[in-house]
Amino acid sequence: MKKGFGFYCVLVAAIAGLAAGIYFQVIGGTFGLDNTHNGVCYDPAIVILLVAGAVLAGVFIALKRYGLASAAVTVAPGAALCLFIYKCYWYVTDVFVGIDEKHGFDPRFITFVALVLVAFLVGEIAVYAKKVKAVKA
């Protein structure tokens, strides 16, 4: 049985989600130079969602349940992204309003958001892409 494009999308999304979860934990969810309360966007649920989504995808791949694996790498990063938006609202507002205009967005913020968006969007692609190619006899 040959693997299709969707299978590789699931793998990429799981790796991006795991990387985002580990990165967010390492930086402690703090952004900006002054690390004020507005720059602290940490919530352990974000890390748990990202890592659990990647682990669940791995388990479902091992069980050859590719549809559930693609669902795991879509729902978990999507929920983590929603929670992250809720937690870092004040940081984003400070940057947009100009309170933190000298510095703009912290590169750690951009890196984390990029990883989560890649995990979510590639996971979304995996939901609709074929995971297994048909074997021609």
Image (cartoon, rainbow, N blue to C red):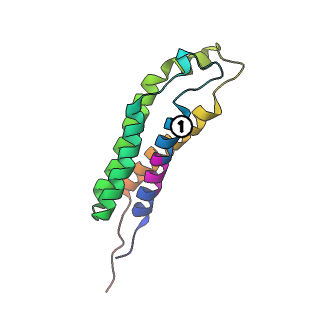
Q: Label 1 is placed on what type of residue?
A: Val
Left or right relative to 37: residue 105: right
- Give residue 16's position: percent from left, percent from top: 49, 49
Left or right relative to 120: residue 35: right
- Splitting the image into 4 quarters, where does residue 8 fall? bottom left
**Residue at 40% across / 29% down in the picture?**
83
Q: Secondary structure at mark 1?
A: helix
Q: Which residue is mark 1?
A: 26
Q: Main secondary structure of the magenta part?
A: helix
Dividing the image into 4 quarters, which one contains the C terminus? bottom left
* Outermost residue to the bottom: 137
Q: Residues within 10 Å of mark 1 (few under 14, many from 20)?
A: few
- Whether residue 13 appears in magenta in the rendering, the answer is yes
Q: What stretch of residues is rendered in magenta?
A: 12-18
User: In this figure, what is the number of numbered marks?
Assistant: 1
- Give residue 122's position: percent from left, percent from top: 46, 51
Residue 70 visible? The answer is: no
**Residue at 36% across / 63% down in the picture?**
130
Residue 104 visible? The answer is: yes
